[in-house]
Image (tube, rainbow, N blue to C red):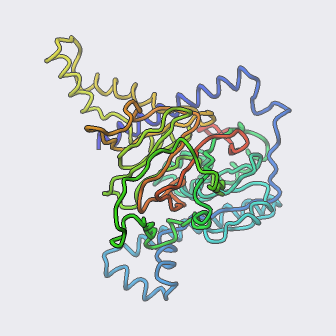
C-alpha cells in the first residue's frame, strides 16, 4: 500500500508543479481568465457523452438479453452483479443530474453514448461534456477535431476515481455551482497538445486500416497478415529487407480520424510476442528494435502510462544507493526516506506540460543483445518532435488512448507528430470552491 501511495504522491506533486509553472507563464504573458481577448465560453448547445458502465458493456456483449438471464450468467461466473447494477444506477443518476442542471439554465442538451457519438452531434454542439472519468473524457476528445470546440468533463464518481482530465471534485459535488462558474467565466482556458497519426502503406491495404473499438467488443483480435514468403508452398524464404530509407512511390497515406490526447501505443496484440519495429526519431537513422511495444505520449499523457513505464521505485533506488556506497565507496545517506526523495525528484522529471510541442517515446522492455538493436545508439526513452514507426509485426495494433485500435502489420508505417491546430481546448478551475 505504501508503494502505491508513494506512486500517487509523486504524480500529484508533478502535476502541481506543472500547473504552477503554467499559471506563472499565464501571469507573465497576461493570458489570465479575465483578459478580454480570450474567447468566451458558449454554452447554448451542450452534448453530454455518457460513460459505458460495466452493466451496459455486459448487456451489449450478450446481445441485449433479458436482465434476469444476464444476472444468472454473471453470478455463475462470480461477478458482483449487485455492485454492477448499483454503479450503473449511480452513473445514470449523475448524468441525468448534469442534463437537468443544463436544461434549467435554458440550454439545449443532447445525450450520446460510445455507440452513438458521431461527427453530426459534435458539429451541432457548442461544447462537449463527457460525464464519467478520464476514459470517457479521452473518448470524447479523440473525435473533436475543431481546436476551438471545448471539451469539459465531470467526474461522475470522485469518491472512487481521480479524474485528472475532468473538473475538480467540488464541481462533481456541486454541478449547478460549477456550471454557473463556467457561464460567468470563472476559469482558465487550457490547450492540450494531441498526437496526429499519418499511416502509409500499400494502396490495397489502406482500406483495411479501420478502427476497432476496444470497449464495445467482448473479444478483439486482428487476423494476422499472411506473408507469402512464409507459405509452405514458397520455394525459398528470403530475409526481410528492412531498408526503409527509400519509400516506394506507389504507397498511399491517410491521416487517422482520431487524435491521441494521452498516448499512442504500437505493438503485437499478443503481449507475450516480441514486437519488431523500426523507429526513426526526428530525422535520425532508422533503428530496428525488438521490444514489448512502443508508447508515444503527449504532455497530458506523461502523468499516465509513460510515467508508469519509466518511473523508479523507491526500493530500486535504495538498492542502487547501497551498491554505490558499499562497492564504490561513495558516502551517502542510504535510508528509505532519502531513497524516496531521490525517486520523487527523478520521477517528476518524466512529466512535462500538457501544451508542449514535443512528444515523449518509451520503448517497453527494450531487447539489447548481440546485434540488437541495429544500429545501436537509440535511447530507450526520450523526447522528440516526431516519431516514425515501420512495422514488421504479424498481428499488431496501433492503439489510440487505449480505446480505439487500428491494424498495424508488416510494411505499414506511421508518422506521429504534434500540430498546434490539433490541440484540444479545455478549461482549468481551482481545486477549492470559488466562493
Where residue 101 sits: x, y (%)? 72, 60
Where residue 11 sits: x, y (%)? 45, 36
| 367 lies above or below 14 | below
Q: Is residue 430 visible?
A: yes
Q: Is 42 positioned to the left or the right of 48 in the image?
A: right
Q: Front-most of 21 and 253?
A: 253
Where residue 315 sits: x, y (%)? 24, 33
Q: Quadrant of the N terminus?
A: top left
Q: Front-most of 342 and 429?
A: 342
Outermost residue, right direction? 36
Outermost residue, front direction? 235
Q: Quadrant of the C terminus?
A: top right
Quadrant position of residue 255: bottom right
| 91 lies above or below 391 | below
Residue ID at (80%, 64%)? 108
Q: Front-most of 387 and 235?
A: 235
Where residue 131 sits: x, y (%)? 61, 59
Residue ID at (54%, 46%)? 262
Q: Is 238 positioned to the left or the right of 176 in the image?
A: left
The mark tally for this picture is 0
Quadrant position of residue 185: top right
Outermost residue, left direction? 326
Q: Is residue 435 visible?
A: no
Q: Is 58 positioned to the left or the right of 73 in the image?
A: right
| 304 lies above or below 60 | above
Amino acid at each position: 500500500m505504501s508503494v502505491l501511495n508513494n506512486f500517487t504522491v509523486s504524480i500529484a506533486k508533478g502535476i502541481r508543479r506543472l500547473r504552477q509553472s503554467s499559471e506563472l507563464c499565464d501571469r507573465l504573458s497576461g493570458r489570465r481568465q479575465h483578459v478580454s481577448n480570450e474567447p468566451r465560453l458558449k454554452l447554448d448547445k451542450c452534448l453530454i457523452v455518457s460513460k459505458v458502465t460495466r452493466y451496459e458493456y455486459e448487456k451489449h456483449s450478450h446481445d441485449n438479453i433479458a436482465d434476469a438471464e444476464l444476472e444468472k450468467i454473471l453470478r455463475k461466473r462470480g461477478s458482483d452483479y449487485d455492485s454492477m447494477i448499483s454503479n450503473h444506477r449511480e452513473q445514470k443518476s449523475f448524468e441525468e443530474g448534469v442534463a437537468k442542471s443544463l436544461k434549467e439554465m435554458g440550454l439545449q442538451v443532447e445525450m450520446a453514448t460510445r455507440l452513438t457519438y458521431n461527427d453530426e452531434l459534435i458539429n451541432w454542439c457548442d461544447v462537449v461534456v463527457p460525464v464519467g472519468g478520464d476514459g470517457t473524457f479521452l473518448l470524447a476528445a479523440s473525435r473533436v477535431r475543431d481546436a476551438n470546440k471545448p471539451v469539459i468533463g465531470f467526474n461522475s464518481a470522485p469518491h472512487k476515481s481521480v479524474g485528472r482530465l475532468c473538473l475538480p471534485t467540488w464541481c462533481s459535488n456541486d454541478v449547478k455551482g460549477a456550471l454557473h462558474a463556467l457561464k460567468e467565466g470563472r476559469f482558465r482556458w487550457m490547450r492540450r497538445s494531441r498526437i496526429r497519426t499519418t499511416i502509409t502503406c500499400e494502396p490495397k491495404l489502406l482500406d483495411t486500416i479501420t478502427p476497432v473499438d476496444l470497449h464495445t467488443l467482448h473479444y478483439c483480435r486482428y487476423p494476422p497478415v499472411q506473408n507469402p514468403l512464409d507459405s509452405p508452398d514458397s520455394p525459398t524464404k528470403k530475409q526481410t529487407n528492412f531498408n526503409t530509407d527509400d519509400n516506394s512511390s506507389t504507397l498511399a497515406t491517410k491521416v487517422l480520424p482520431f487524435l491521441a490526447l494521452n498516448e499512442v501505443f504500437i505493438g503485437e496484440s499478443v503481449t507475450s510476442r516480441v514486437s519488431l519495429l523500426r523507429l526513426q526519431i526526428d530525422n535520425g537513422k532508422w533503428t530496428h528494435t525488438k521490444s514489448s511495444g512502443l508508447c508515444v505520449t503527449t504532455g497530458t499523457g506523461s502523468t499516465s502510462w509513460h510515467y508508469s513505464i519509466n518511473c523508479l521505485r523507491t526500493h530500486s533506488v535504495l538498492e542502487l544507493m547501497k551498491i554505490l556506497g558499499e562497492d564504490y565507496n561513495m558516502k551517502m545517506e542510504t535510508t528509505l526516506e532519502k531513497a524516496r526523495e531521490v525517486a520523487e525528484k527523478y520521477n517528476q522529471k518524466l512529466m512535462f506540460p500538457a501544451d508542449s510541442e514535443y512528444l515523449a517515446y518509451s520503448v517497453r522492455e527494450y531487447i539489447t543483445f548481440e546485434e540488437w538493436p541495429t544500429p545501436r545508439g537509440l535511447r530507450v526513452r526520450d523526447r522528440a518532435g516526431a516519431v516514425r514507426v515501420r512495422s514488421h509485426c504479424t498481428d499488431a495494433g496501433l492503439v489510440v488512448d487505449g480505446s480505439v485500435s487500428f491494424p498495424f502489420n508488416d510494411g505499414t508505417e506511421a508518422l506521429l507528430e504534434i500540430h498546434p491546430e490539433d490541440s484540444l481546448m479545455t478549461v482549468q478551475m481551482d481545486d477549492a470552491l470559488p466562493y
